[in-house]
Amino acid sequence: MGDLVQVAANRAVATIRLDRPPMNALNAQVQAEIAAAAEQVSADPAVRAVIIYGGPKVFAAGADIKEMSGASYSQMAVRTRRLQDSFTAVAKIPKPVVAAITGYALGGGLELALCADFRIAGESARVGQPEVLLGVIPGAGGTQRLPRLIGPARAKDIVYTGRFVGAAEALAIGLLDQVVPDAEVYAAARDLVARYAGGPAIALRAAKQAIDAGLDVDLDSGLEIERLNFAGLFGTEDQQTGMRSFIENGPGKATFAGR
């Protein structure tokens, strides 16, 4: 994989590991390698679930400010498109994805975590969108994904103040899904996604697509997205396996092939 972002798979779970010490600043190279990693795990049928991890000390402390501080409007108009595209590639991974957050997830780091389906953090983790303190605003999804997750008023508070949010508060407002001791973050993330690794991969992909696409349309359109995804699963081997197992053995005992 890349020099600053690696992909390692173990028992159907792939880990996208950021590795740019000391703070995993998200420069242009990291962004490109994140996008490549997302494409790799998306295309690999052996990968059934994904963890995004920055290591035991920090998730990602944001963009590389030195890299962008002297940029012009025209330069940033191009660069932010690349940045958003790299994170959107993560959001579109058609498999369950969890962000395992240690230390700081700030600015672009939090925006990357928002692209996951779930977020698990250590007790001492701190998250936030401090861009306003630099005279700018979030540029990689913070003004869009954050309010969709926690509501506009809470998102505005975090974006307007630029404050760092502790793990307990982030859990209480729904920004995090689970808080564990710092040393247990990665193990907790593996435990969370392990339950999906043996599941019906095509059905999980359809569920993710229906939920994510449905959030951006009206209810009638969302129901149509759901209906078509539901009906389409009746052309899969997993649907036949699952329903046959239910009839013969009861619920929750099927072994899925992911086809």
Image (tube, rainbow, N blue to C red):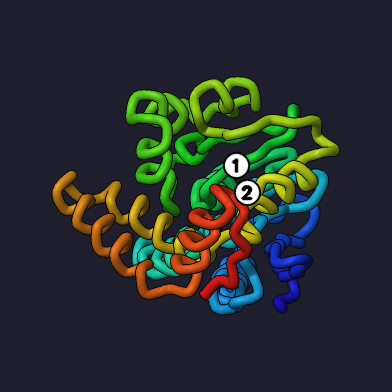
State how many labels appear.
2
Classify mark 1: helix, strand or loop.
strand
Q: Any mark on residue 219, and which?
A: none
Residue, x 21% and y 51% (percent of image)? 223
The local crowd at label 1, few if under 14, some if 14 to 19, many if 20 or more residues have their Cα within 10 Å, is many
Please state which amino acid type lies under the numbered disc 2.
Answer: Ala
* Front-most of residues 204 and 247: 247
> Label 1 belongs to which residue?
119
- Going by the numbered disc 1, the residue's amino acid type is Arg
**Residue of label 2:** 99
Q: Are marks 1 and 2 in contact (CB under 8 Å)?
A: yes
Q: Closer to the N terminus: mark 1 or mark 2?
A: 2
Mark 1 vs mark 2, CA separation in Å: 5 Å
Q: Position of residue 166 (x, y in %)?
A: 64, 25
Q: Is residue 190 left or right of residue 229?
A: right
Q: Which of 211 and 202 is in front in this view?
A: 202
Q: Which residue occupies the foreground of this view, 19 or 135?
A: 19
